[in-house]
Amino acid sequence: MTSDITLFDRTLAIVGTAFAWLPIVATVAFSLAESIGTGTFRIDWLMPAGMFVFYGVGAAMLVLVAIGTRRHRRLVVGSVVTAVVTLLAAQGLALVSGLASGQREPTGWAWALALVLLAGYTIAVIATGVAGLRLSRNLLRAGG
């Protein structure tokens, strides 16, 4: 089974993991810089959703490697599907409820549900990053 693992698989897993973590790392880095600069804690909690393109590229790489090598498939695919579904649900809710256009004030059940869905998305992004780390470590230890 170790002979099936190629340098391309390992490289794709490592690069995919880096891209999957980018929205979280960037959010934390910018939050720290802003908080240190102003002396007040600040965080852009929408940033991970706004950086979905980077996450999507990394997630696609990880899914390809996980399926191709038959390692950590459930963890990788499950976290990616969860991230996509929760983000689409949050955006759909924001559009339908009027939160996205500003027709509705950010209060009430729709606002709370949108925040919960965005939190679920962020947790799923972190789970994908962890899955990518585990996949990369597994492929690097496979030898060959």
Image: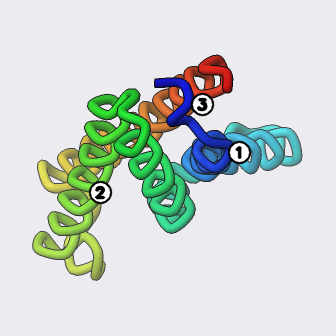
Q: What secondary structure is marked by label 1?
A: helix
Left or right of residue 109: residue 117: right
Percent x, y for residue 125? 44, 42
Q: Is residue 21 above or below residue 123?
A: below
Are dots 3 and 1 in contact, CB under 8 Å? no
Residue at (67%, 26%) from the top-left corner?
144
Left or right of residue 25: residue 110: left
Is residue 24 visible from the viewing direction of this image?
no
The quadrant where residue 122 appears: top left
Is residue 10 visible from the viewing direction of this image?
yes
State which mark lies toward you, 2 or 3. 3
Percent x, y for residue 54? 56, 62
Percent x, y for residue 124? 37, 38
Residue at (69%, 37%) from the top-left corner?
41
Q: Residue 87: give its label.
A: 2
Percent x, y for residue 112? 22, 45
Q: For mark 2, does the 10 Å Cα neighbourhood hold few (<14), some (14 to 19), or many (20 or more) residues? A: many
Q: What secondary structure is marked by label 2?
A: helix
Query: Which residue is most to the right?
Result: 37
Left or right of residue 28: residue 113: left
Q: Marks 2/1: CA distance?
A: 21 Å
Q: Could you tell me the amino acid type at mark 2?
A: Leu
Q: What secondary structure is marked by label 3?
A: helix
Residue under pointer 1: 31
